[in-house]
Amino acid sequence: MPTAPVKKPPVKRTAVKSTAAKVAPARRSASKTPPASSADSPILPVDQLDALRKIKPDAVEWVIQQTQIEAEHRRAETTRVNDLIFVEHLLAQISALIIGVAGIWGGSWVAVNGQPLIGFAIAAVVVTALAVVQLTARKKRQ
């Protein structure tokens, strides 16, 4: 005798209450250090210098001098990094040129010595690989 399928009771679905994350209020620090500036200015803002002059008048000249030294160092480092990036890109282009020329020369040599299809395949693989590397590198930079 066939048995009747057992009916399961329907699943009761309830709505889930979503809550927003609460952000703690910002605390005021007792530190007297000025906030970091993202500008490349060699001098602190006037109100900060004025407050420092009230606390310790002879320190203002020292702060200005140290800020100028730090800004000059940061500019020199930025120039150095940009130069190194330029050299890296230039060496990459020269390396790609050498690899491409070697691949085409090797494929041509094989083709001239009796295997034209294999020579064509070698040259095509090298050129295709360089194109893929160049396009993926450009895509990553964007």
Image: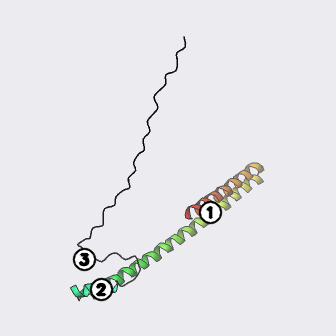
Of the residues shown, which amino acid type is indicated by label 2? Answer: Leu
Q: At 52% from the left edge and 18% from the top edge, which residue is drawn?
A: 4
Q: Which residue is mark 3?
A: 32
Question: Which of the two residues, 121 or 21, is positioned nearer the viewer here?
Answer: 21
Q: At 27% from the left edge and 67% from the top edge, which residue is drawn?
A: 27
Figure disc tally: 3
Q: Earlier in the sequence, mark 1 or mark 2?
A: 2
Of the residues shown, which amino acid type is indicated by label 3? Answer: Lys
Could you tell me how far apart the alpha carbons at marks 3 and 1 are, in whole angstroms? 54 Å
Q: Residue furthest top?
A: 1
Q: Which residue is mark 2?
A: 49
Establish if 117 lies above or below 140. Answer: above
Establish if 113 lies above or below 43. Answer: above
Q: At 45% from the left edge and 34% from the top edge, which residue is drawn?
A: 11
Question: Which of the two residues, 124 or 101, is positioned nearer the viewer here?
Answer: 124
Could you tell me how far apart the alpha carbons at marks 1 and 2 are, in whole angstroms? 54 Å
Q: Secondary structure at mark 2?
A: helix
Q: Residue furthest left?
A: 55
Q: Is residue 70 left or right of residue 2?
A: left
Establish if 112 lies above or below 91. Answer: above
The answer to the question of whether label 3 and label 2 lie on touching residues, with beta carbons closer than 8 A, is no
> Can residue 115 be seen by looking at this rendering?
no
